[in-house]
Amino acid sequence: MPRDHLQSAERSAAGSAAGTPGRTSPDAGRPDAGRSDAGRSAAGRSAADGAEAPFLELLARGAPAEAYEQPVLLARAEARPVERIAALERAKLLALRVRSEMEGRRRREAELSALFETAHDLAGLRDLDAVLRAIVQRARSLLGTDVAYLSLNDPERGDTYMRVTEGSVAARFQQLRLGMGEGLGGLVAQTARPYVTDDYFRDDRFQHTHSIDTGVRDEGLVAIVGVPLTLGDHVIGVLFAADRRTRVFEREQIALLGSFAALAAAAIDTANLLAETRAALSGLERANEIIQDRSAVIERASDVHDRLAELVLRGGGVHDVAAAVSEVLDGTVEFTEAPAAPARALESSRAEGHAVRHGDDWIAAVAAGDELLGALVLRGHPGLDPVDQRTLERAAMVTSLLLLARRSAAEAEQRVRGELLDDLLDARDRDPRLLRDRATRLRADLDATHAVLAARLEGGTAGAGHEADARRRLWAAASHLAATRHGLAAARDGGTVLLLPLAPGDTATELARRTARELGTAVHEPVTVGASAPVGPLLARPDTVASAYAEARRCLDTLRLLGRAGDGSAAEDFGFLGLLLAGERDIAGFVDRTIGRVVAYDERRGTELLRTLDAYFACGMSPARTKDDLHVHVNTVAQRLDRVGRLLGDDWQSPQRALEIQLALRLHRLSGVTPPPPAQA
């Protein structure tokens, strides 16, 4: 409160009193002693002068209502005249009325602006959800509530569900569904009348249910108002505003929420009309497309006939047929093996001799007599024209002819490859030149580095017939793999043997694991693969391939004994056990793989890491005892062992690695290598 206005008014009142002739009276001791009635009236008017000024300043700066008490309190604290205080009280009341009127005007202006903006959004409706979100946001902002939300009726389920929420934090509340008549929202949706409560949980007008009350309690709502969204005589939803504290909603606020509800209903109605219009246009476009398709269907049938005939004449493959039909039918056509195709649809197509629909796809069986070779599958094309259906069926027939021809050629090549591998394994007296010539015709290079792999099924199939069929499939898959990798394959010892070249940088282990995965995928059963060490050239000795096959068989048996059925591995993966599996006992290779980096480090640096390792293991892996044995400081032992760890890896002291390292140290000593001269590590 500006104090100078009060002081000015007081000085004005004092001046008026001083200019009035006084006289002595019994009342001379009172503040107004010596004044006549007229003088006192003039003094009151003087005291009232300027009382409005502090309140005008408060109005000008938009001060809160509480601030309007300050001028009156200050006047009383300074013992201002009664007339002055009364004038300030009157000015305060008048200023508060003016303030209330101004606030009301500003509020109505904001409400009208929000309604205008919402109507503008509705006029340019593109996204219904965006318009509904804007309505809910503006309703929450103008009513000053914690939460606002909108629900829509679901005629099929007979309830109402949350569509848009603003300010909500509880997931359960946002997923609520209210039955008709349940809760405040269900009552509004049922009766088409607004309902308001200042304390939801104490209000027994609503049908409280566990799910609704739990959702409202999770959100922490107390005061709720809901107004219906109506289209004609039908209620399509409810618009809500809610607070997390007790609150009495004013009539004007409920009316404003009703205005927003009317706009929301109009937005939904407009969106429905737009959707219906779009659907009608889409129907007309579809009809036009059908007419255009009909005019082109005969032309497509003639085109596919010419393409298929050309494919057969130039020796095209199955995938060429699928690609040609895909282009003609304007869809994706794939050839699928019989086990991977839908069994019921495939059998139905074979029995009927026609393509059949399976979901959104079409299945045309590729068969030769009673044998199912696979299927042509047209993906994602549920509406297939009868002429296009016959095109797919004709393509399936051409595919079966191509498959039979390819099978005959593949069987002949597989037989030739198997015979060559059998001769490499068994007929050791064959002429190497003849073997090399036969391999060249099959695009196999016998002078390259190869690995021999022994493969066996692990499916545990029931029945001799099923097992024999599985073995045939394994041999066929292995033969196909060998043909694509320029190798050889043959059935042997209840399994399959493969001779595959090693690519630069490839290892026998990687080749075995990759082969196990590929064969297992092809036959749909686990396949275990053991590999020999790399060998080559294959014709250097007559027994090269046979010895490598024996090693691969031992590796295969070891995998099965170790419970690693369905895996692939080579002898080098088993550490010192690989020495037992290897036909030629590659001791130098084992020592080099195990401690080769330590040996090389000692040779380069003249250190004693090997000697330290020997002493460390001999002393029970105790650094304290090791330093006594070596007659060095314990820190020296620690430094050397740290260097060993960096060379061999952090797990070098694990039981398995430690055993292999000790064996490699023993073999290194037995090999007669002179230890390097002593030096500090």
Image (tube, rainbow, N blue to C red):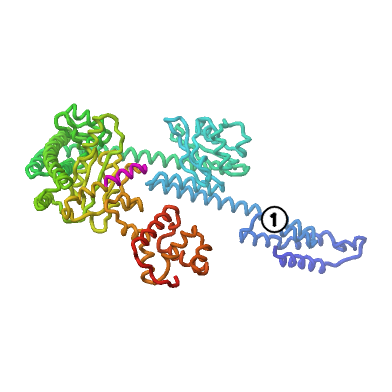
Task: Pick the quarter of the image with the C terminus.
Answer: bottom left
User: Which residue has dot 1 on it?
Assistant: 92
Left or right for 513, reference 155: left
> Which residue appears at 23% of the width and 47% of the height?
549
Query: Toward the viewer: 307 or 663?
Result: 663
Instruction: Report x, y in % for residue 65.
Output: 66, 54
Rendering coords of residue 342 (x, y %): 26, 33
Q: Is 572 situated above or below 334?
A: below
The residue furthest left is: 313
Which residue occupies 30% across, 40% down?
526
Residue 273 painted magenta: no
User: Would residue 517 be seen by someone viewing this image from the given angle?
Assistant: no
Between 115 and 208, the one nearer to me in the picture: 208
Q: Is residue 93 found left or right of 260 in the rendered image?
A: right
Could you tell whether 357 is left or right of 310 in the image? Answer: right
- Residue most toward the right? 26
Quick one: SS at disc 1? helix
> Between residues 263 and 224, which one lies in front from this camera angle?
224
Image position, residue 352 (x, y; %) = 18, 27
Residue at 33 percent of width and 37 percent of height: 276
Q: Amino acid at mark 1?
A: Lys
Would residue 554 be counted in the magenta stretch? yes
Classify the position of the N terminus by image quarter: bottom right
Is residue 20 positioned above or below 191 on the image? below
Magenta stretch, overall SS:
helix
- Give, as a single range, the part of the protein colored magenta: 552-563
Number of marks in picture: 1
Q: Is residue 505 above or below residue 483?
A: below
Number of other residues with Cα within 10 Å of mark 1, as a class: few under 14, some 14 to 19, many 20 or more: many
